[in-house]
Image (spheres, rainbow, N blue to C red):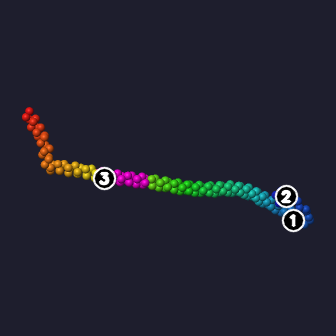
Amino acid sequence: MPLTPLDIHNKEFTRSFRGYDEDEVNDFLEQVIKDYETIAREKKEMEEKIKQLEEKLSHFSNIEQTLNQSILVAQETAEDVRQNAEKEAKLIVKEAEKNADRIINEALAKSRKLTLDIDELKKEANVYRTRFRMLIEAQLELLKNDEWDKMFEPLEKEEEEMLQK
């Protein structure tokens, strides 16, 4: 066990005939006691300061651990968000492709239907034109024919009879 300032102060030396000068020894011991008390006090203060610094170090180590864990969680969360965004983007692209295919297929179906309708209308127009041509040709034949004049004879007779009355 180390000496305390009180141990140094209470230390009694045996007296001898030709010993050291008692006042000089006592002065020296007083100086040693003062220095020893100062060192002991400084040691105690240093120990308290070390304890406080160790507590702070422990506190900051805990904060560091917490921050590291938070960073890891944030990185994992960011990775999850990125992966989810990629998945969602792929789903959106697939949905857009499906819609585009559907729209294209509908447009192609409408186009085919319109083509068929146009072909049908062309056929009907040709039939109408042919019939109309035949009608006109028949009418022209009728106009060219001598019977045209004969056709109006009964009418002319009726007119004359009406006028005579």
Q: Which stretch did the figure color magenta?
A: 103-125
Q: Nearer the viewer, mark 2 or mark 1?
A: 2
- Spot occupied by residue 20 in the image (x, y as percentages of width and height): 87, 65
Q: Are marks 1 and 3 in contact (CB under 8 Å)?
A: no
Give the CA separation, mark 2 to mark 3. 133 Å
Q: Nearer the viewer, mark 2 or mark 3?
A: 3
Task: State which tag comes first along the sequence, 2 or 1.
Answer: 2
As displayed, is residue 76 above or below residue 165? below
Please state if 66 lies on the left or on the right of 3 as rendered: left
Outermost residue, right side: 17
**Mark 1 is on which residue type?**
Tyr
Considering the numbered disc 2 on the image, is that residue within a helix, a strand or a loop? helix
**Mark 2 is on which residue type?**
Asp
Please state if 38 lies on the left or on the right of 129 as rendered: right
Residue located beneath label 2 in the image = 7
Task: State which tag comes first along the sequence, 1 or 3.
Answer: 1
Q: Nearer the viewer, residue 46 or 159?
A: 159
Q: Nearer the viewer, residue 92 or 160?
A: 160
- Spot occupied by residue 153 in the image (x, y as percentages of width and height): 12, 42
Considering the numbered disc 3 on the image, is that residue within a helix, a strand or a loop? helix
Magenta region, main secondary structure? helix
The crowd level at tag 3 (other Cα within 10 Å; few <14, some 14-19, many 20+) is few
Residue found at x 91% / y 62%: 15
As displayed, is residue 121 above or below residue 23? above
Which quarter of the image is occupied by the C terminus? Answer: top left
Residue found at x 38% / y 54%: 112
